[in-house]
Amino acid sequence: MGLLDVVRAKPDPMPVIKQTASVLAAVKQMLSVRESGLLILTPGGELVGIITEKDVMRLIAERYTQLDKVEVWEVMSKSLTTIASTATVDQALQVMTEKHIHHLPLVEGSKAVGLISLDDIISARLKKTEHEAQLLKDFIAQQ
């Protein structure tokens, strides 16, 4: 399956927003379509940019003057999805996909023991695939 097949299977294969839209509108759209980024296109469909959660976080850190007055508990997610620290990478990926989340706390009982992100999983899978490919190459070279 190719990347385009994966993208076309999504409910909104190309989440876009006008470059004249407000950042608040972009954040609301990201939340409504469950995407962490939106493409910015010209009226003719040419790609001119992308806005992501990181861009919004950078903007908040640089320009928002009240962040030192808002306490974390006021904005934190309180309804948590967690996974046992003994779970597999595949199980974590399945939970993240089903719940549309990018971060998953690892727990042992009621105690947090770590945090895994979608990027962590992708990186681990890539390293494993590269290692397996190298083992196969080495095996073939020995034949």
Image (cartoon, helix red, strand yellow):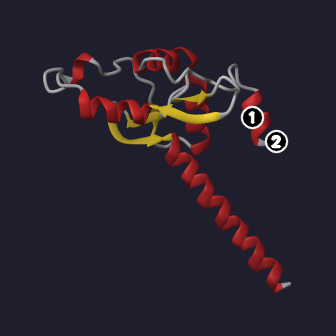
Measured Cα–Cα span from mark 1 to mark 2: 7 Å
* Circle 2 residues within 10 Å: few <14, some 14–19, many ≥20: few
Viewer-proximal residue among 3 and 136: 3
- How many numbered marks appear? 2
Q: Position of residue 110 (x, y in %)?
A: 33, 30
Residue placed furthest toward the bottom:
142
Q: Quadrant of residue 11?
A: top right
* Circle 1 residues within 10 Å: few <14, some 14–19, many ≥20: few
Q: Position of residue 116 (x, y in %)?
A: 45, 42
Tell me which residue sits at (25%, 29%) in the image: 63
Chain-order first, disc 1 or disc 2: 2
Q: Which label was assigned to residue 40?
A: none
Asked if residue 56 lies left or right of residue 129, the reply is left
Q: Secondary structure at mark 1?
A: helix
Mark 1 is on which residue type?
Val
Q: Position of residue 74 (x, y in %)?
A: 24, 16
Viewer-proximal residue among 115 and 18: 18
Viewer-proximal residue among 51 and 72: 51
Residue placed furthest toward the right:
143
Mark 2 is on which residue type?
Met
Q: Are marks 1 and 2 in contact (CB under 8 Å)?
A: yes
- Residue on which disc 2 sits: 1
Quadrant where the image shows the N terminus = top right
Residue 108 drawn above or below residue 67: below
Residue 62 drawn above or below residue 66: below
Asked if residue 103 lies left or right of residue 7, the reply is left
- Residue on which disc 1 sits: 6
Q: Position of residue 140 (x, y in %)?
A: 83, 78
Tell me which residue sits at (62%, 56%) in the image: 126
